Amino acid sequence: MLKSASILSAAVLAAAGLAAPASAATFTPNPLSNVTFTGNLTIQQPGSIVTCGVTLTGFVPGGGSMVVITQALFSGSWQCSALVAPTGLPWYLHPNTTTSVTLQGIGLKTMVGSCSGTVNTGWINGSPGKIDFVGVTIPGSPGACTVTGALNSSPSLTII
């Protein structure tokens, strides 16, 4: 009886060792040498609010574990081009699930101060896939920035 229990235990342990680890979310297609996100974002900070056209440009390395954002442009009203600017590039967009991403290292110079940090926000798979900012709070000074809007990917990215 003891020998049977030992063999059964060994079989269970061996099977557990062969189980595949849970796979992480990834962007597809990958690798991709050029991806662009475009749309409008509203940026609020105590004492200011502005809506800007935003273009983020970057690439997806092999494996699809992130998008490396190497360029960020703000356009629209004179405030967007003169008073709002990206800081701390590159930024890194990591897929968490098919509905969630983390934007690491985002930084903004704003009309009244600055905001920077790492934030979690939404993702919408579709054609195109998009970053969905719904009242995302970025730590800052003289107060946090709240960002709302969506940026569409081109070519379209999907999280799997």
Image (tube, rainbow, N blue to C red):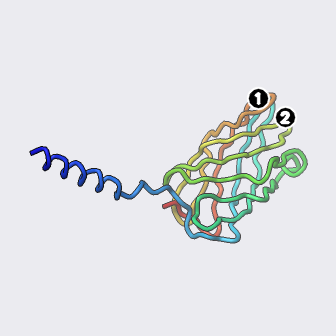
Question: Is 16 situated left or right of 42 in this image?
Answer: left
Q: Position of residue 47 (x, y in %)?
A: 81, 30
Indicate the quadrant where residue 111 lies.
top right
Q: Position of residue 77 (x, y in %)?
A: 84, 51
Which residue carries the number 1 mark?
Answer: 143
Which residue carries the number 2 mark?
Answer: 113
Tell me whether circle 1 and circle 2 mark residues in contact (CB < 8 Å): yes
Question: Is 79 situated left or right of 21 in this image?
Answer: right
Indicate the quadrant where residue 29 lies.
bottom right
Residue at 53% across, 63% down: 158
Which structural element holds mark 2?
loop
**Closer to us: 97 or 154:** 97
Residue type marked 1: Gly
**Closer to us: 85 or 66:** 66
**Extreme residue in the left direction:** 1
Residue at 34% across, 58% down: 18
Question: Is 16 situated left or right of 65 in this image?
Answer: left
